[in-house]
Image: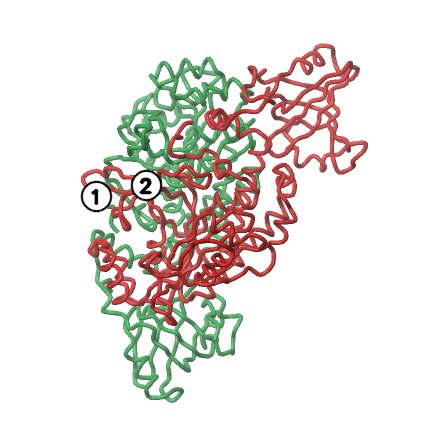
Chain colours: A green, B red
Amino acid sequence: MKQVFIKDIAEHAGQEVCLKGWVRNIRHSGKLVFIILRDGSSEIQAIAFKPDMSEETFERAKRLTLESSVVITGVAKPHPKNEAQYELSVSNVEVFQLADEYPIGKKEHGPDFLLSNRHLWIRSSKQWASDLIRHTVYFAICEYLNNNNFFRFDSPILTPNACEGTTTLFELEYFDEGQAYLSQSGQLYLETGIMSLGRVYDFGPVFRAERSKTRKHLTEFWMMDAEAAWVEHDENMQIQEELIRYVIRKVLDTCAKELQILERDIDALKATDAPFKRMTHHDVIEYLRAKGSEITHGSDLGAQDEVMLTEGSPVPVFVERWPKEIKAFYMKRDPQNPDLVLGNDLIAPEGFGEIIGGSQREDDYDLLLARMQAESIPIDDYRWFLDLRKYGSVPHSGFGIGLERLVAWMSGTHHIRETIPFPRMIYRIYP
Amino acid sequence: MKQVFIKDIAEHAGQEVCLKGWVRNIRHSGKLVFIILRDGSSEIQAIAFKPDMSEETFERAKRLTLESSVVITGVAKPHPKNEAQYELSVSNVEVFQLADEYPIGKKEHGPDFLLSNRHLWIRSSKQWASDLIRHTVYFAICEYLNNNNFFRFDSPILTPNACEGTTTLFELEYFDEGQAYLSQSGQLYLETGIMSLGRVYDFGPVFRAERSKTRKHLTEFWMMDAEAAWVEHDENMQIQEELIRYVIRKVLDTCAKELQILERDIDALKATDAPFKRMTHHDVIEYLRAKGSEITHGSDLGAQDEVMLTEGSPVPVFVERWPKEIKAFYMKRDPQNPDLVLGNDLIAPEGFGEIIGGSQREDDYDLLLARMQAESIPIDDYRWFLDLRKYGSVPHSGFGIGLERLVAWMSGTHHIRETIPFPRMIYRIYP
């Protein structure tokens, strides 16, 4: 009989169906065995009642172990107390494999044990829910961009140059061509793409060989970089805000069950669907100092500053117009104040920190060259990047979103390592 | 005035609109200047007629150079001889940047020159069309999978072990954890994912440090790996066939203009939308030998064999049930013949070669362990993979599609290096 996915069970009410999955939980009581069956799409309670089947089948059901793989046949019925929920009245149970004693039990496990057993831990309800939210966020981002004239333009991972020093770069030998580096961002390549396609984005893994052990750092993570011709600083922030709002609404609309499993504060998430705040870096420093921080003008924001900044704010906060010394060479100078650049970060509420970095880009050849020289960037290696300012330069802007940080915020997950199937950290590359 | 994208011009017929883009081509004749303007979304002919504007504006239009970036205002009008096509009757031209003499001209350039100027070459019509087809193929694959109960499950790029020897692996130092390798396939990780999500796929870059210089090899390319619980060999091929058919139809439906620019043989592509052929490896060898090949049973197919096999076939050909010696350790033995495995390749017609490799996977712990030992795979490093056969093993299958090869076939592009924005090959890592 053809497999029915549990999520589609309501379409088969009253019919005999065949479900295929794993035993999430099992208990028995007299003539009844209650099996929580999961199949990846959802879960259902299957009830085996001894008089409905052979002695042998009932015994088979009773002896099932956690995580055993089974094919269960039965009739789908609405739950007597909750019509929206379905149960399966079992007629047959076939065991594909009776699982060994499952190492992840009901007792608490430390993170090291769980991470070493990540290949099994991903089956738990919370990890399952987190993966589905990741899937949803990924495609919500793509949908928004595809609907707004952006095209995918995959930038390379293997890159020949170390733009901003090699300290946080993974390095490897590339045949006879010397050293190559794993990309930290596709942005510079995307700037070539806008000259062909107008608006482009990439969405793939990037790498940072950072010796950080915070709950917000991975050495391998997924980044979406977007870049758009003819878009300037204000419109750039507007696109970012619309995109994040699109993601929030999509998650709220389609992931109610997953959010519930993760015990996400739904009201807090709903409250973010309102106009985001915009503050200049200067005003942010003033604000933080007034709240008692000792941060100075000209400083980057640390994790604690980000928390203090968004405390009490239901919506994310844009921090814009940064001192040029603490931002990248390619950001465009603020025409109103040449000490600043037209960059922005977006800081999520509830302590989830920075989720976007963006800016308008320097489009003038001479200004860009001067800035690169001042920062000792090897000009010859970046001739191709400078070429973009010689052959039809345009005003343009872009931004990057860290997928895991956005998923952590949407799902209310404290530690970013749970938002990616196989996290890579300084002391963790297995499994 | 707000930018209108050229692809949407028909919605603004008779109105004054503002277009922003680059000069693809320009010629003038008396009181007329004809500008081919491209903006990434499409192209349009803009006609500047001297009496319609100031002397200064007309002179500005006349002096435009190839690839200059411009903002052109004018009225959108249907072409007098072709109502489906639009022209712009120009009222104003603003130049953002007058481009230097553009290095890619109308004369023929060699591949080395074009690849060294890839950051500019991507602007040419054919490269633009190829990128759009890549975008379309990427999302057609995702759509099909998302509609068929598959979820994204990103497998890691940084992996601790060298499963099948290190000769074609890129290697790097991973902090104090020793050597790490860039992934060649996420398949083994996807097998963990099906136990949580039922059906999963990844879609990202993979890496092969191969010293190959053929037109079908890249060192960095994009791969979609899919894996499904409870799916066996025949259904696995059925899913592959449906997926490829979905992609073909999507490309035919939405990329007519791009296919025309690339001079793709549309009839050949349409002809592939029919049931695919299925042949066993054994029968393929017999068939090739009957056609004069000297290939022997037990041999893999070379590029020439693939061409000969599909000659005269309008549709792709599945080659299934391979000798186990020439296929990977994780493939399930054919229950009808233990010398064979339930693997399949899919060979595209018109000489485009292998585009899919797939198989049912060995789901029995003892048989898998024996096979791994026989192939000297370091068992301890793959305990996690073996665990999947201890805790609820299920029959399962999967397959991998090389994005660039599929795009090359769809677009009729001879050399795979033109199907990815920045190709990486043995002698090529710049720009």
Which of the 4 image quarters holds residue A59? bottom left
Secondary structure at badge 2 equals strand
Which of the image's four quarters has the N terminus of chain B?
Answer: top right
- Of B174 and B90, nearer the camera is B174
Rendered location of residue B403, percent (x, y): 47, 45
Q: Which residue is drawn at 43% across and 47% down?
A: B223
Which of the image's four quarters has the C terminus of chain B?
Answer: top left
Q: How crowded is mark 1: few (under 14 residues within 10 Å), some or many (20 or more)?
A: few
Q: Can residue A240 be seen in this view?
A: no
Q: Mark 1 — on which chain does it sit? A: A
A147 is higher (above) or lower (below) than B91: below
- A286 horizontally vs B288: left or right: left
Q: Residue at x 50, y 40 (%)?
A: A243
- Of B223 and A46, nearer the camera is B223
Q: Which residue lies under the disc numbered 1? A: A427
Q: Residues within 10 Å of mark 2 (few under 14, many from 20)?
A: many
Q: Which residue is drawn at 53% across and 70% down?
A: A11
Which of the 4 image quarters holds residue B183? top left
Quick one: which residue is furthest to the left in this view?
Answer: B176
Secondary structure at badge 1 equals loop
- A31 horizontally vs B271: left or right: left
Q: What residue type is labelled 1?
A: Tyr
Rendered location of residue A209, percent (x, y): 27, 35
Do the residues at pointers 1 and 2 share their chain? yes
Q: Which amino acid does label 2 sit on?
A: Glu
Who comes first in sequence, dot 1 or dot 2?
Answer: 2
B313 is higher (above) or lower (below) than A229: below
Cα distance between the residues tagged 1 and 2: 13 Å
Q: Is residue A96 visible?
A: yes
Q: Which residue lies under the disc numbered 2? A: A220
